[in-house]
Image: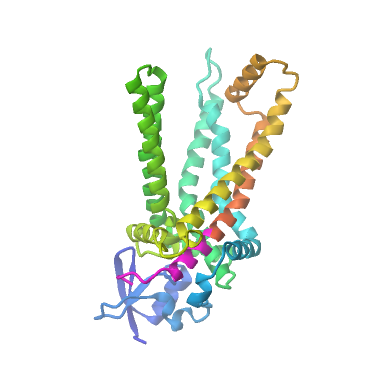
Amino acid sequence: MADQWIVRVQGREYGPVDLDELREWKREGRLIRENEIREPGSERWIRAGELPEIFADEATPPELPMEVVRRLSFGGMFRASWRIYRLGFGRFFALALLVSAPWFFLQIAVPYLEMPKDQGPLAPVIISVAVAFVMLVLLVIAWPFSLAGLQLLAADLYAGRSPTLRDLLTRAKPLWSRMFILGLIVYGSYFLWTVIPLIVAAGLAAGATSFGGLLLILLLLIFSLYMVARLFINFLFWQQAGTLGGPDAMGALRESKDLARSGKEHPRRQRPLYRGAIIASVWLLAIILLNVAIELPVVLFQMRGVTSLEQALTTLQAIATKSPDLLAGLTTLLSGLLHAALRGWLAAIFVVLYFDTKHAAPPQPND
């Protein structure tokens, strides 16, 4: 092994430095297994995790035979993800709370931002603005840590390692900017190509009476559905590729798209896109059912004594417009906790699918 190495992080090169300096960078969290390194004068980059002098104390991920990975069934994927989720539940939950906690307080503060009528007191509005601003800042800061940490934890548990929460946050720190940029690209694309057409369609529907107007609304809805499908395909593995794969944000998006579109030579039930769509559908259905199970008893309790459709509509409108009370706050809290508890399983099964697809897919030209 060479005594001097150059490290590349997000396109920038550092060094050359010796092995002692690399060990110090590793202890500080500035060097992780996924970083690229090369010898001075060489153009061949390798992963830092391939240096036994630096990462000898960490177990390497087991190399699964190609036949085993190709035979991983849906049942096998669910069993593997459940094992990962069970082993790391506490850490999964803590990482998910990094986002769920500020989001909960943001939801509570937003309804109080409305200016009071009849020159009412401004103190609640000022406090709500301050709380909403602080929670929004915390949400922006914690969100990339949570995304990267969930993927790193699932990957480590899948490989037989058991990292601490502190180690996960340390390793997620160098990935913060990449995950933030990826999140802006992914959610910005969804907003641009789906939400905006739906807003335009809703505006047209409010005053459309002609056949041409109705046809335009229908075309906008079809276009929105088409774009949702295309974006879902291209961004299927963006969180996993951003944390565990590509060297930068754009490389991660290319890897996500290539993996999602791979496996066309396999039966449909074995293709990553088919499996990813089923997993996402199961996750969405579970979230909807849990939210209904939480909120329906509250709604039924508040609608006790309603005897007509007009009363029911009036009560529902009052529930939707009134400021949150203790019961609504508890409902929001319980919903957020359940969502945080389930995010670990979603990360686990998509990491399993990611590694299954990456091993089963043919090598890419730039590998």
Which stretch is magenta? 350-367
Q: Residue at x 53, y 19 (%)?
A: 116
Does residue 347 appear to the left or right of 294 in the view shown?
left
Picture layout, residue 288 above or below residue 202: below
| Quadrant (top left, top right, bottom left, bottom right) of the N terminus | bottom left
Q: Is residue 361 magenta?
A: yes
| Quadrant (top left, top right, bottom left, bottom right) of the C terminus | bottom left
Magenta stretch prevailing secondary structure: helix
Q: Is residue 277 magenta?
A: no
Does residue 292 appear to the left or right of 367 in the view shown?
right
Which quarter of the picture shows residue 288? top right
Does residue 54 appear to the left or right of 344 in the view shown?
left
Q: Residue 241, can we see it?
A: yes
Q: State the colouring used for the structure image.
A: rainbow
Coordinates of residue 329 in the picture (x, y in percent): 65, 34
Q: Residue 61, can we see it?
A: no
The residue nearer to you, when weighing 6 against 246, is: 246
Which quarter of the picture shows residue 95? bottom right
Coordinates of residue 71 in the picture (x, y in percent): 53, 70
